[in-house]
Image: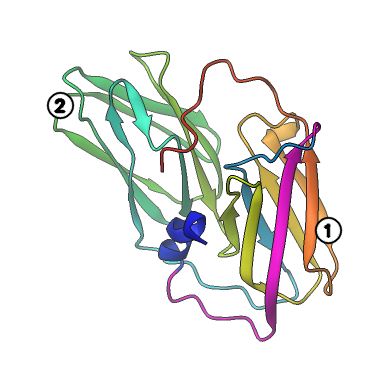
Amino acid sequence: MARNWLIALAFAGAAAPVVAAPLSVRVSDMAGKPVRDAVVRLYAPATPSQSLRQNAHFVISQQNLQFHPFLTIIPVGADVSFPNLDPTKHHVYSFSPAKKFELKLFAKDQSRTVHFDKPGVVALGCNIHDQMSAFIVVTDTAWTARTNGQGIATFDNAPDAPSRVVVWHPLLRAPGGEVHQEIAAAQRTMSFKVRLRPPAVQMPMADY
């Protein structure tokens, strides 16, 4: 439950579906080992959608020449601040279709803010420090969760209706880094077995 506090905060006040039941999604690699920090989204077209908070605000700092956190989940319409806590300047950018932007050189204790108005995955980089990378998942569904150390994402109020489950991870070997699977109305557990690329560098996935 603690793993989903960020999503719960962003979507606070969302209307509950007419019928809901717990749903558990497990993500593992081809060797059966759990995959943590995968982002799981649930779409139920026949169910009234939950509302997303449009004024949510998040922070991704730059410290010790890294982005913190490495992975951030936000709702469409959220703002993200990028404070620089390093003694050197940073130049944050993204070329991702979901949000292309460039925050030109800004120094220690300065900050810039970006508004994210489309769903999708946004890869971050620094034009000065090539080793800096991070991801933002901008979601358009309030049914969004992150897998824990056991590779499990839990939805306490998942709609009891035919749905589509989407799993994304930065190392997942698939177009766009995501895989899809349909789920029946009565199904309350499901599993994904995914192929992962070896990381180019050690990724600080658990620093949230």
Q: State yes or no: residue 28 in magenta.
A: yes
Residues at marks 1 and 2, CA–CA distance in whole angstroms: 47 Å
Query: Is label 1 in a helix, a strand or a loop?
Result: strand
* Residue depicted at x 57% and y 15%: 200
| Image quarter hosting the C terminus | top left
Q: Which mark is residue 108?
A: 2
* Residue depicted at x 60% and y 32%: 170
Query: Is label 2 in a helix, a strand or a loop?
Result: loop
* Residue depicted at x 55% and y 53%: 139
Residue 19 sits in quarter: bottom right
| Left or right of 129 on screen, residue 107 | left
| Left or right of 88 on screen, residue 20 | right
Q: Position of residue 86 (x, y in %)?
A: 20, 24
Q: Is residue 83 above or below residue 198?
A: below
Q: Farthest residue toward the bottom?
A: 18
User: Amino acid under label 1?
Assistant: Glu
Q: Position of residue 72 (x, y in %)?
A: 45, 44
Question: In this view of the protein, which residue sits in the foreground, 198 or 182?
Answer: 198
Question: In this view of the protein, which residue sits in the foreground, 105 or 184?
Answer: 184
Span colored in magenta: 12-31
Q: Position of residue 144 (x, y in %)?
A: 58, 58
Q: Position of residue 197 (x, y in %)?
A: 69, 23
Question: In this view of the protein, which residue sits in the foreground, 12 or 80?
Answer: 12
User: Amino acid under label 2?
Assistant: Lys
| Circle 2 crowding by C-alpha within 10 Å: few under 14, some 14–19, many from 20 | some
Q: Is residue 70 above or below residue 159?
A: above
Q: According to the image, label 1 marks what residue?
A: 182
Q: State yes or no: residue 83 in magenta.
A: no
| Left or right of 69 on screen, residue 159 | right
Q: Which is more N-terminal, label 2 or label 1?
A: 2
Residue 184 sits in quarter: bottom right
